[in-house]
Image (cartoon, rainbow, N blue to C red):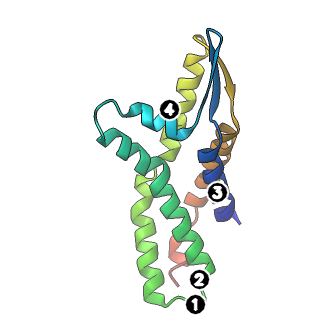
Amino acid sequence: MLVSAALMSLVASNLFPIVEMTARGSTTRLRLWECLRGVNDGLAWPFWLLLAVTLLFPLCELTNMLYSLLGRQRAAPGERSRLMQLLDGLRPWSMILMYMGGMLVSISRMDTMAVMLPGVALVAMGVLIILLAALLVIDTSDLRK
């Protein structure tokens, strides 16, 4: 099931280091949380915005889709319709694909300043991008029935 694989990839991308960076003899392992926290330079709104579009909205979208698929027999038709409307409303705000593209460009640009080794989370994010792209093709109107 694509949804459960995407959820596992989302969890793995948040638990494991994205990149291991070595510069001047010092090695640093960066996780997604640490990257997001680094954005917070006195302003709280960029942190919360990035947290929402990279973690909260995709998590809500995937759990909503998983609930819709698993609870399809038990849920009332009106309840499924409201969940699918919420899912359709969250899709434009799920910017994890754009965030990952920017992160990959940043990592490739920083390669001249430090030795960069991809981490497990970077691979999990790549898998998540592919799975989310596959899930975005699914027409949610079939799930409303």
Tell me: 72 left or right of 91: right
Mark 3–mark 2 Cα distance, whole angstroms, equals 18 Å
Mark 3–mark 4 Cα distance, whole angstroms, equals 20 Å
Q: Residue at x 43, y 36 (%)?
A: 37
Residue 145 horizontal/vertical position (percent): 53, 85
Mark 2, secondary structure of its residue: loop
Mark 4–mark 1 Cα distance, whole angstroms, equals 41 Å
Mark 3, secondary structure of its residue: helix
Quarter location, residue 132: bottom right
How crowded pointer 4 is (Cα within 10 Å; few <14, some 14-19, many 20+) is rated as few
Quarter location, residue 8: bottom right
Q: Earlier in the sequence, mark 3 or mark 2?
A: 3
Marker disc for residue 102 = 4
Q: Give the residue pinned by disc 2.
A: 71
Label 4 with label 1: CB-CB less than 8 Å: no
Q: Give the residue pinned by disc 3.
A: 6
Mark 1–mark 2 Cα distance, whole angstroms, equals 5 Å
Marker disc for residue 52 = none
Q: Residue at x 50, y 63 (%)?
A: 61
Label 1 with label 2: CB-CB less than 8 Å: yes
Q: Amino acid at mark 2?
A: Gly
Between 142 and 126, the residue placed more toward the observer is 126
How crowded pointer 1 is (Cα within 10 Å; few <14, some 14-19, many 20+) is rated as few
